[in-house]
Image: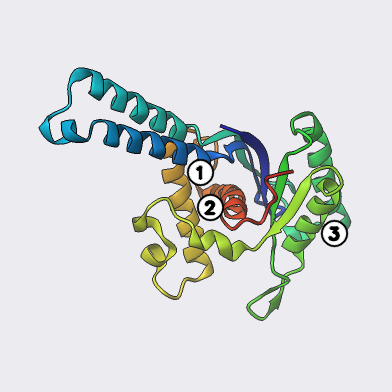
Amino acid sequence: MIYRTFLGFDCAYVSFAWTYCDINIDIIADISAIYQQINYLNNKYHSSLYEGLCGEHIDEYTEIINRLYMLLANFIRIREIAVVDLLKGKKVANVSEMERALALKKFLVDRQWDSMLADNSIVCIEHQPPKLSNKINSVSPAVGFQLAFYFCDKYQTVYIDPKLKGNLSVSQKLTLAAVAGRKAKYIDRKKHIKLNLIEFAKLFNFDISNIDTRRLADAGDSLFTILAAIAYKKVNLTL
C-alpha cells in the first residue's frame, strides 16, 4: 500500500468544509496482485475445487480473503472532516469582501497546514462556477481563488469540476439518477452527496457525528471532490 495525503475543500464562507485524509493510491495494483494469487490457487487446487477443499487449502484462501478485506478497509484513512462558519453567524451580505478574505486567511494560517502536509500532498478545490443559472456567482469562486493562491506554490493543487462528484456513488442505490431521477436539481445533488457520505462513513468506519446534519452535504462535497480527482485522473499521483 502506498498512501498519499489529500486535502479537499468545498468553497463557501458560511459552510466552509474540508477533508484531510490519506488514500492508498496503489489499491488497483494491490487488488490485481491478490487476484493473481487467487488465480494461482485456483489452478493449483483445480480438482479440489470440485471434490472439496481440505483444511490447508481453505486456510490459504482464507488468508487471501483476509488480506483483501484489510486492503479495502484501509483504502482511506480520514484524519479530519469538518464544516465551519468562517463568518461566525453573520450573513454573507453583511460582511465586506475584505472581511471575508481576512476570515478565510486567518483560518488557514491558524490551522498550520504546513505542519500537517507532506511535500507531495495534493490539494483539491471544488471549482465553483461563476454563474448559477442566470445569476452571477461571485462569492464561492472567491473562496476557491484564495485557497489556490494559498496552496499552489507549496503543493500540487487542482480545481475539480463539481459535476464529476455526481458520477460517483457508494452503491447502485445511491447513484444520482437513483436518488434524483434524470433531471437533478441543486437540492438533489446535495441529497445525493449527503446520503453517499453517510454510507461511506459506515463502510470505512469514520465519525461524522460532529458535523451538523444540515451541513453533511458540504462535508461530503469536500471528500468526494478528492475521490473525483482520483477517479477522473485529475491529479498526478507519480509526483
Percent across and percent down for residue 44 are 28, 31
Q: How far apart are marks 3 and 2 (CA)?
A: 25 Å
Kindly identify the amino acid type of the residue bearing the numbered disc 2. Answer: Ala
Kindly identify the amino acid type of the residue bearing the numbered disc 3. Answer: Glu
**Where 52 sits versus 105, above or below?**
above
In this image, 107 relative to 76: left or right?
right
Tell me the element at label 3.
Answer: helix
**Where 145 sits versus 102, above or below?**
below
Q: Mark 2 points at which residue?
A: 217
**Where 186 sits versus 221, above or below?**
below
Q: Going from the N terminus, do you reach mark 3 or mark 2 first?
A: 3
Tell me the element at label 2.
Answer: helix
The residue at the point 61 percent across, 40 percent down is 82
Q: How far apart are marks 1 and 3 (CA)?
A: 44 Å
Closer to the eye: label 2 or 1: 1
> Between 214 and 230, which is closer to the camera in this rendering?
230
Query: Which image quarter holds the N terminus?
Result: top right
Q: Which mark is residue 97?
A: 3
Q: Going from the N terminus, do you reach mark 1 or mark 3 first?
A: 1
Q: Mark 1 points at which residue?
A: 28
Percent across and percent down for residue 204 are 46, 36
The residue at the point 64 percent across, 63 percent down is 161
Tell me the element at label 1.
Answer: helix
Decide: few, some or many residues near mark 2? Use Cα within 10 Å; few <14, some 14-19, many ≥20.
Answer: many
**Where 148 sits versus 166, above or below?**
above
Kindly identify the amino acid type of the residue bearing the numbered disc 1. Answer: Ile
The residue at the point 62 percent across, 34 percent down is 3
Furthest residue toward bottom: 134
